[in-house]
Amino acid sequence: MSQLSCLFEAKSLAVVGASNNPSKYGNIVLSNILEGGYKGVVYPVNPKEALVLGLKSYPSLSDIPDDVELAVIIVKNHMVPDVMEEAGKKGVKSAIIISGGFSEAGEKALQEKVVEIIKKYKIRMVGPNCQGVNYTPNKMCATWPLIKQEGKMAIISQSGSVGAELGKQAENEGIGVSAIVSLGNKADVNELDLLEYFDQDKNTGAIALYLEAVSNGKAFLNMAARLKKPVVILKPGKTEAGQKAANTHTNSITGKREVFEGVCRQYGLINTDNLGEFYDCAKLLSMTKKLRGKKIQLVSSSGGGAVLACDAIVEENMELAMISEDRCRKLKAKYPQHFTVGNPFDLTGDANPALYKEIMLELSKEEGIDVFMPIVGDPIRGVAEAFLEVRELIDQEIVVCFFGGAEVQVEETMKMHKQGLPVFPSPYRAVKAIAQTFQKKSSIN
């Protein structure tokens, strides 16, 4: 933790290559650091500018009168070794090298020179050829796009674009992230360092890992055996074409997919097949705590939504919970005849927040229910408050499916997400995420 704390919890940083030109990454990154509300002190470094974005600019790192913990470097590749040498002499503890043009471009010797320098000065480095780092607890968005919403999902990605997409989805849905780290060429800090860090990070609940190549197979096995927090993985290269593209992306070797999938199964890592599944699983695992088993109870306002959910439950090897005959008799006597009592429990067009709450509280007394999946297929206002209240009163987990609700759906979903209650826009996506969450927790147990 202490080795990477100087990166994520840096109290001061310098942007080397800061710029007033909006088309330059040195401008974009510095703007995001400032607009993100970074808690520390910021020093722009640009020998040609006296002021950058209203801040005093310094000709070099050595000209900064105070200590600098983190250097964010966005200069031409051939300038990086000199900048890192200067950073070492300055006492900089960590660096993010966004500049490209290293081993991924055939400049292996240039990258090795940078590595020699950071080893000499004991600097921890992310990159080169990366999209930067965002750590929301420190309000440090040294990357793009600007993402400010704090959450419990840490994203580690060998692709800057994949990390950015996941992070932006999480922010748009009101879930947020604890961190986004673009690995780039992994010349120093790699997935093993970050898995260890975020597994201990109090601000992280689950880790999403996009990985094209494993840095060290044996070390990865040892790390997987020690992890306590859930990890969701998307590893591309299922096809020959995909493997070839991955191998050339950051000049790395992908390895055999079958072996990697076996490791995931053995250690309870969630190995997903596509970007949508990757996001859904990471989202759910960062928000759930107490999934007990695979028996799901549906309570729905939509008959069609309930049918789709039933199909998904069977396809994903989950189970529809069984309601006792005694409970069914009592409920049939209490509610209108046009209600379907059982599983699914269909509230039809009479559905309202109070009814959802009442039914779920009554069914929660049944021992055969592990997860409640309320399905809202209409623009019903107030369900967020109802489901959040129920969550505090029952032992079972709640995973909501809300679709067909237009603007009301968006408003209610945001309310639930901001309180840590997961919502999915289709029955299949909800069930798929539940199934994979259960598999992860089962493996740990």
Image: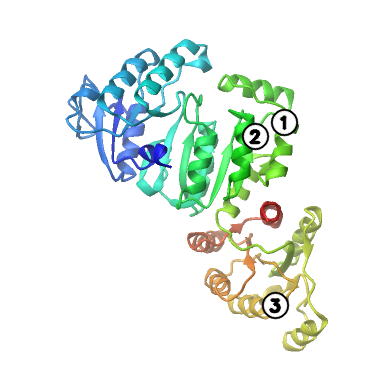
Quadrant position of the C terminus in the picture? bottom right
The Cα atoms of the two marked residues, 2 and 1, are separated by 8 Å
**Which amino acid, by three-letter code, is at mark 1?**
Arg
**Residue 96 visible in rendering:** yes
Q: Is residue 189 left or right of residue 66?
A: right
At which x and y percent is residue 410?
53, 59
Evaluate if marks 1 and 3 touch, with contact meaning CB atoms under 8 Å apart: no
405 above or below 323?
above
Report which residue position mark 1 lands on.
257
Mark 2 highlights which residue? 235
Q: Is residue 265 above or below residue 159?
A: below
Cα separation, mark 1 vs mark 3, equals 43 Å
Q: In the figure, is residue 10 to the left or right of 349? A: left
| Residue located 41% across and 17% down the image | 116
Indicate which disc, 1 or 3, sits on the residue closer to the N terminus.
1
In this rendered view, identify the residue nearer to me: 262 or 273. 262
Q: Are marks 2 and 1 in contact (CB under 8 Å)?
A: yes
| SS type, badge 1 | helix
- Residue nearest the viewer, comparing 143 with 232: 232
Give the vertical position of 341 relative to 69 (above or below): below
Q: Residue at x 59, y 75 (%)?
A: 353
Q: Secondary structure at mark 2?
A: loop
The amino acid pointed to by label 3 is Leu
Q: Position of residue 103 (x, y in %)?
A: 51, 16
Image quarter (top left, top right, bottom left or bottom right) of the N terminus = top left
Task: Say few, some or many: other residues with alpha carbon within 10 Å of mark 1 (under 14 / 14 to 19 / 20 or more).
Answer: some
User: Residue at horizontal 49%, vertical 50%?
Assistant: 204
Q: Secondary structure at mark 3?
A: helix
Pointer 3 local density, CA inside 10 Å: few below 14, some 14–19, many at least 20: many
Disc 2 residue type (three-letter): Lys
User: Can you tell which quarter of the image residue 132 is in?
Assistant: top left
